[in-house]
Each structure stands twice: as C-alpha cells, then as structure tokens.
Amino acid sequence: MVAPGIVLFDDVDAEHWAKRIIRNSNREIITSQTGEAMRKVAFICVHNSCRSQIAEALGKHLRGTDFDFYSAGVETKPQINQDAVRLMRELYGIDMEKTQYSKLISDIPKPDITISMGCDVGCPYIGKAFDDNWNLPDPTGQNDKAFIDVIRRIEKNIMKL
C-alpha cells in the first residue's frame, strides 16, 4: 500500500513528466524499480552556469530513473554558458535551455548528496560539507576540447554514482 501523498509511476516517461508537478507540491517521487524515494543529487558551483548545469543535464539524461538531479550556485548568471549549451546539444541532443536555468541553492529541494564541481574558482559554503568534490576545471573561455574533456569526466562520474 502506498502512503497518502506518495505517487507510483510504472512508465519512465510518465515519471519524468510528473516530476515537475510532484516537486512543486513537495511530495516524494517513488520509483517502480525500487519502491523507494529517489535520492536527490545536487551539483554545486559558484555561478551555476556551466559545469553544474552540464552535470544536471547529463544526470537527468543518463541516470534520471535512478536519482533526482539538480544544480545550483551561490550566485546566478542570466544564462547558461553558451558553449556548454552548444556542445551538449551536439554531443547528446540535450537542449539545456529548454529545461534548465541558473538557480540559487535556496531554490532547490534539500539534497541527499551534494557534489562540488571543483574549487579552482572557490567552493561555496552550503551549510555542510560536500559529499564529494569532482575537482573539475572551469572550461569557460577555453576551446571545445577543454569543454569536451570536462563533459566526459562528468559523464564518467555520473555513471559511478
């Protein structure tokens, strides 16, 4: 028996579609695969405009039925890094601008797992220690090779979660 306020979805597409509605009403998402609430993973950067956005998009794309992924920062930017947007569209067919935007840590639900993208630009304080630090260099302003290297490292790390 499912408790009141808990919704079960058998169809992965229906589950993905319904997440927005369930998130807004602060209900847990229960997966039919495990029967348990999905763990919330937050990727944290200072500006939430490049690495953390890539991680959120890849997390949803690669492991969206295993975890509920978010990204956030201590500051926001008016738009996601356009090189990251272009390369994610080219490499994975993901249009980050359709579903993502720069968010503050206070804009996302409390995560079960928090991952820093790398402190080469200074790690933000989030009120607790990070569960992991992926130590990724910020590719902003660099060539496509630097971006692709970071994207591939993020993909590899997400598959290890």
Image (tube, helix red, strand yellow):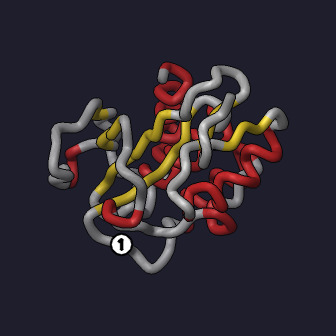
Whether residue 111 is visible: yes
Which structural element holds mark 1?
A: loop
Q: Is residue 15 left or right of residue 72?
A: right
User: Residue at the location (60% across, 37% down)?
Assistant: 3
Whether residue 144 is visible: no
- The residue at which mark 1 appears reads as 76
Tally the marks: 1
Return the x and y of residue 91 as percentages of the image width and height. Answer: 70, 44
Q: Crowding near pointer 1: few (<14 within 10 Å), some, many (20+)?
A: some
Return the x and y of residue 45 as percentages of the image width and height. Answer: 32, 54
Nearest the camera: 105 or 23? 23
Q: Is residue 3 left or right of residue 101?
A: right
User: Residue at the location (66% across, 33% down)?
Assistant: 2
Return the x and y of residue 11 as percentages of the image width and height. Answer: 84, 37
Return the x and y of residue 76 as percentages of the image width and height. Answer: 36, 72
Q: Is residue 130 left or right of residue 92?
A: left
Q: Is residue 117 left or right of residue 12?
A: left
User: Residue at the location (32% across, 64% down)?
Assistant: 106
Nearest the camera: 11 or 139? 11
Whether 118 is drawn above or below 52: the answer is: above
The amino acid at mark 1 is Thr
Q: Quadrant of the N terminus?
A: top right
User: Residue at the location (62% across, 55% down)?
Assistant: 22
Q: Quadrant of residue 77?
A: bottom left
